[in-house]
């Protein structure tokens, strides 16, 4: 998997045209949600938790 990641990263820089798709396969439909909205909600809650614990990062020169 690591070699695949490195090869795809190289192609992304060389061609500057790379798309990533994620597919979830399961035997039972009720195992995973029908939409991926739960990912955005989880990311938002993690961002909020991270921002409340530490001072936000600053870019160099700010």
Image (cartoon, helix red, strand yellow):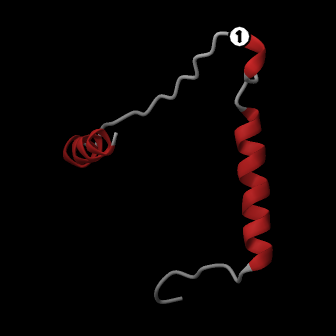
User: Disc count in the image?
Assistant: 1
Residue for badge 1 = 28
| Residue 58 place in picture, x, y as percent | 57, 82
| Residue 36 place in picture, x, y as percent | 70, 30
Q: Residue drawn 58% across and 22% down? A: 24
**Does residue 58 lie above or below 31 as drawn?**
below
21 to the left or right of 43: left
Furthest residue toward front: 27
Q: Quadrant of residue 11?
A: top left
Furthest residue toward left: 14
Q: Residues within 10 Å of mark 1 (few under 14, many from 20)?
A: few
11 to the left or right of 43: left
Q: Is residue 6 visible?
A: yes
**Which image quadrant: the C terminus?**
bottom right
**Which image quadrant: the N terminus?**
top left
Label 1 sits on a secondary structure element that is loop
5 to the left or right of 30: left
Q: Quadrant of residue 41?
A: top right
Q: Is residue 34 visible?
A: no
Q: Residue drawn 70% across and 83% down? A: 55
Front residue of this view, candidates 17 and 52: 52
Front residue of this view, candidates 3 and 40: 3
Q: Residue drawn 27% across and 47% down? A: 6
Front residue of this view, candidates 28 and 8: 28
**Does residue 46 lie above or below 34 as drawn?**
below
| Residue 10 place in picture, x, y as percent | 22, 47
| Residue 22 place in picture, x, y as percent | 51, 28
């Amino acid at each position: 998997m690591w070699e695949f990641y490195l090869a795809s990263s190289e192609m992304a820089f060389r061609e500057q045209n790379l798309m990533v798709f994620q597919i979830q396969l399961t035997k039972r439909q009720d195992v995973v949600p029908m939409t991926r909205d739960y990912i955005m909600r989880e990311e938002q809650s993690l961002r909020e938790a991270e921002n409340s614990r530490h001072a936000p990062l600053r870019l160099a020169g700010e």
